[in-house]
């Protein structure tokens, strides 16, 4: 496996993997993956990564979204990491998250946030192995009439990783 910078040519694979994650019911409130343009407009231009198998097939991706337009939050980003369900359990999430942390710090980002459904035990464990800590629980978000958990209130575990090298005095 290799982790490399994402290109627009990876867009179809990124959207397919995102859609497969949505269908698990424990990845996001989104009910549809949308288009590449939707994804592209919703993520920072920096720190876009894909993991590829030995045939150069994209098997996972990672990216960042801004949390606020206020200048005091310029070093804070929300992370997304998705692995093709057929490729899980092979260290792809670990490789992507480690590379994303390094790439974010190279861009001057001092704090990463993740919102994860408490039922997604594997994702929470992955983040904790990379230095994320639970900082709260948002209760009863997203009671929507669509999506994998239609009509159900969902809690979201908020995790944060504060860099030990960026923004340290």
Image (cartoon, rainbow, N blue to C red):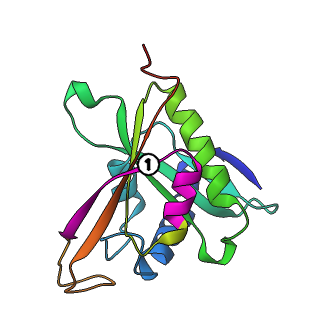
What residue would you read off at disc 1?
133
In the rendering, at what x and y percent does residue 159 appear? 39, 52
In the rendering, at what x and y percent does residue 71 appear? 23, 25
Let me know if residue 14 appears in the view.
Answer: no
Residue 134 is one of the magenta-drawn residues? yes
Q: Residue at x 53, y 53 (%)?
A: 128
Q: Residue at x 42, y 13 (%)?
A: 169
Q: Residue farthest to the top?
A: 169
Q: Which residues are magenta?
A: 123-140
Pick the front one: 38 or 22: 22
Q: Say few, some or many: other residues with alpha carbon within 10 Å of mark 1 (under 14 / 14 to 19 / 20 or more).
A: some
Q: Is residue 61 above or below residue 19?
A: above
Q: Secondary structure at mark 1?
A: strand
Quadrant in the picture for residue 126 = bottom right
Q: Is residue 81 above or below residue 3?
A: below
Q: Residue at x 44, y 18 (%)?
A: 168
Pick the front one: 164 or 21: 164
Let me know if residue 85 appears in the view.
Answer: yes
Q: Residue farthest to the right?
A: 54
Relative to residue 120, is residue 98 drawn left or right?
right
């Amino acid at each position: 496996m290799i982790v490399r910078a994402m290109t627009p040519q990876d867009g179809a694979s990124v959207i397919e993997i995102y859609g497969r994650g949505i269908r698990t019911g424990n990845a996001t409130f989104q009910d549809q993956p949308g288009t590449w343009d939707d994804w592209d407009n919703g993520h920072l231009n920096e720190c876009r990564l894909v993991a590829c198998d030995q045939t150069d097939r994209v098997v996972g991706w990672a990216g960042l979204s801004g949390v606020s337009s206020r200048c005091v939050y310029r070093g804070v980003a929300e992370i997304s990491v998705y692995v093709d369900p057929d490729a899980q359990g092979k260290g792809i999430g670990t490789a992507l998250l480690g590379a994303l942390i390094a790439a974010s710090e190279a861009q001057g980002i001092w704090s990463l946030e993740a919102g994860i459904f408490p039922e997604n035990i594997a994702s929470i464990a992955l983040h904790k192995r990379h230095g994320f800590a639970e900082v709260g629980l948002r209760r009863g978000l997203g009671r929507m009439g669509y999506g994998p958990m239609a009509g159900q209130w969902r809690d979201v575990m908020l995790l944060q990783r504060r860099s030990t090298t960026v923004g340290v005095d």
